[in-house]
Every structure is written in structure tokens, then in C-alpha cells.
Image: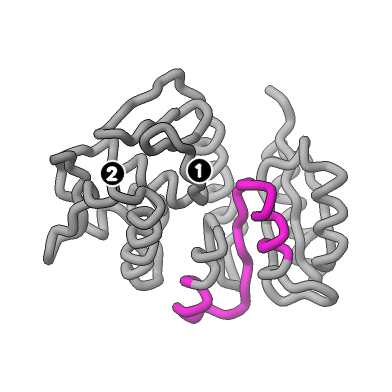
Amino acid sequence: MEEQGLLIVDDESRIRKLLKDFLIKEGYKIFEAEDGEKALKVYEENKRKICLIILDVMMPKLDGWSVLRQIRQTSKIPVIMLTARGEEQDELFGFELGVDEYVTKPFSPKILVARIKAILNRTQTKTQEVKEYGGIKIDSEARTVTVDGKIVELSLREYELLKYLLDNENVALSRDKILNNVWNYDYYGDSRTIDSHIKKIRHKLGKRGKYIKTMRGVGYKFEVK
């Protein structure tokens, strides 16, 4: 199997070493950066080898949010955000920018490794299946979504949430079930983050967004009618 590269971006050398030691044992190739400017440089020079970024928020020269904004201009590479703060608004802000996971320090390296594996399994599993749902086509191999023939740009989390709804067409899904299946691990924030993602997906789907029904007191259901 081809070696998978991870970029660790954190201004604390002990954090980088801790993660590096764990991840090397798991067979990953590690790239490092101690500030935002170097992170962008390392990523640009090695982006064909890097399949996921672990990105700290508070860093010198260029903070994590700025780094993420620049990366998201050209790439949908999975990003796990590290932060010393655990405020709900910070988490929602991160998801709006395209964060795939949000981990608050201090954290368990073993759990972080498990999250990395889960994200990579989801993003790199290939199927040769294209399905259509009332004008919405989803290509699981290319990880693309088109609406009436036009490609819709979705973040990784938006894509996975939409795919989960489509895979469970006509099934009412509770917010807890969505969190458990799309976010995978215990999520300690507010389930309103789902509502925020649904709102953005509906907007991007245009007139097809009406297929995502709000089930009052329950959650959501995808239904073509």
C-alpha cells in the first residue's frame, strides 16, 4: 500500500513530536511545520504526497484559520483542527471554513489517530457507483455531486452529510444518528452544527434543496416528491 503523508502544523514542538511518534508507528509519512507560513510552503511542495492536515489554530506568522482559507481555495484535502479553546462558536466557525474534524487540547493521541483513520477510510474508499436522486447525481468514486448537470462544490463534511441522507432516502434520521454516522465519534458540541450544514447544502442544491425535509422534533429526511 502506498505510504500516506500527513502534515502536522503546530508551534509546540512537543505536540508535533507526540503526534509524529504515534503516527509513524501507524505507517504514515510525516511532514511538519511550526507556523502558518511554513505550513503553506510545505503543503505546496508536497501536496501530491499529503492526504490529510492536522492544523493548530493559534500560531505565529499566520494562524490556522488563515492557512485553512488559503488551502480551501484550491483543495478539499481533509483537515483536522487543533485548538486550546472549546467554545461552540469557534467550532461552528471552523466547520463553516471547511474543517472536517475539530479537536480540543488536551486530547488523546490514540483517539486522534482513530479519527485520522476514519476520515481517510471515508475519503479514500472507492466505489464505481453513480446514483441519481431527482436531478441530483452523486459519484462515490470521484466524490462529486452534480445538480441538473452542473457540479456543486461541497466541503468534505457537506458531501458526507448529503451522501448519508441520500443513502437513507425516505428514512427519517435523528440528529443524534446523523452525528454518530457522519461525525463518527462522540461530538460534544451542539447538534445545531447539523442545521448549519443542512442550510448550506440546501442553498447549494438550489431548487433541489427542497428534497431535504425537516422532521420536526426528529431531524431530517431526504425525499424526492
- The total of numbered circles placed on residues is 2
Above or below, comparing residue 117 to residue 106 in the picture: above
Which residue is disc 1 drawn over? 118
| Magenta residue span | 67-92
Image position of 214 (left or right of 60):
left
Q: Residue at x 36, y 48 (%)?
A: 205
From this viewpoint, which residue is outermost toward the top?
A: 128
Q: Nearer the viewer, residue 109 or 46?
A: 46
Which residue is disc 2 drawn over? 165
Disc with the residue nearer the chain's start (2 vs 1): 1
Q: Distance from label 2 to label 1 (Cα)?
A: 19 Å
Image position of 7 (left or right of 185):
right
Image position of 28 (left or right of 168):
right
Image position of 93 (left or right of 225):
right
Give the amino acid at mark 2: Leu
Give the x, y percent position of residue 17. 79, 59
Give the x, y percent position of residue 96. 50, 65
Question: Is 79 inside the magenta-drawn segment?
Answer: yes
Q: Nearer the viewer, residue 21 or 58?
A: 58
